[in-house]
Image (spheres, rainbow, N blue to C red):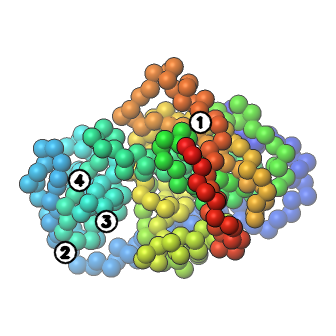
Amino acid sequence: MACRSVCRVFPVRLASNAAVSRPSVAELLGWRSQIFSREQAKQRAMYPRTEKIEVTLEGPGLQGTVLIMNRGVSTPYSCARHLTEWHVSTAALALVDGQPWPLHRPLTQSCTLSLLSFKDQDPQEVNQAYWRSCAMMLGQVLQAAFKEEFLVELLRSPELPVISGAFCCDVVLDSRLDSWTPSEEDLRSFGCDAQRLIQQDLPWEPLEVQPAVAMEIFTHSRTKREEVEQRTAESPTGTVTLYRCGDHVDVSGGPLVARTGLCSQYEVTALHNLGPGPWGLHRRAQGLSLPLQLQAHHTIWRRLKKRAERLVEVPPVPSATHPQAPTPAPEV
């Protein structure tokens, strides 16, 4: 299929001398997912006895509704399933005691719960989670799109407001690809890969872990280990939040929406060169998407896409091993 041919047709001669001893992409994904599952099971085992909690629902038509759920097991998604199919299909994020909460994260105490959708009166939290989710999906696509012999390292994705016009995923490709410039067909192929993930309607599973666990998961990724150090230093609890989608595991600086199937229109619009960085040639992949509940006329979509092709400039994040001077934030 054409959408799987992106970069896989890159001249084989470039890889003829690439005698690198590293796990394949499939082996890396399996390694990370296995440790994720192990830690997930360990955390669930912390609640061996069934303890009940009261979840007081908030929102239109739900005031005063109280659900009796299982501590450490039940999630906001579990609560949605006790309501209606509409709540299950539209819920993207939750507020637990007023704080953003992933739909698949277990509840640990009695609380108030609001289910958020893209059509709420104030969708800021869910929109930001959606933008973050689209960026993580783009990283998942990029990591699987190239030939096995080409190393792909995902950098820390910049945290961008929706008004920036594009979600972004920063990446370092194999140095043998430094001269490669993606064609329109390549970008469309990336988009096809994302659409396959959307059609599978995969959940984004959250897991809060200690830095040592995250370091073990990313044993083979120099860039992700550095990001774990950064996230740990920034976290008030000293923990790191991971997400798994299928067998892809990555780090996130905030909550993601419930599942890939909430996405609808999704296109990869550009892959810009950012210049040399600590790990090689840094690039910024950009994209544009709208959720299933919101659609744009094709003329509006074209304008949005044109805007999303322009480089989104963000200040660099100081590296734990390569500190940089503070850079003022650009005007949006």
The x, y position of residue 56, in whole percent, is 15, 59
Residue type, mark 2 in image: Glu
Q: Is residue 5 visible?
A: no
The dot on residue 114 is: 4
Q: Which residue is mark 2?
A: 51
Residue type, mark 4 in image: Ser
Q: Residues within 10 Å of mark 4 (few under 14, many from 20)?
A: many
The x, y position of residue 158, in whole percent, is 57, 55
Q: Which residue is mark 1?
A: 308
Q: Which residue is mark 3?
A: 106
Disc on the earlier residue, 3 or 4? 3
Q: Residues within 10 Å of mark 1 (few under 14, many from 20)?
A: many
Of the two numbered discs 3 and 2 in the rendering, the one whose residue sits closer to the viewer: 3
Height in image: 40 above or below 254? below
Q: Residues within 10 Å of mark 3 (few under 14, many from 20)?
A: many
Q: Is residue 9 left or right of residue 217?
A: right
The x, y position of residue 5, in whole percent, is 72, 38
Kind of element beneath mark 2: loop
Q: Residue at x 49, y 23 (%)?
A: 300
Residue type, mark 3 in image: Pro
Disc on the earlier residue, 1 or 2? 2
Disc on the earlier residue, 3 or 2? 2
Query: Foreground residue, 196 or 94?
Result: 94
Q: Residue at x 40, y 72 (%)?
A: 41
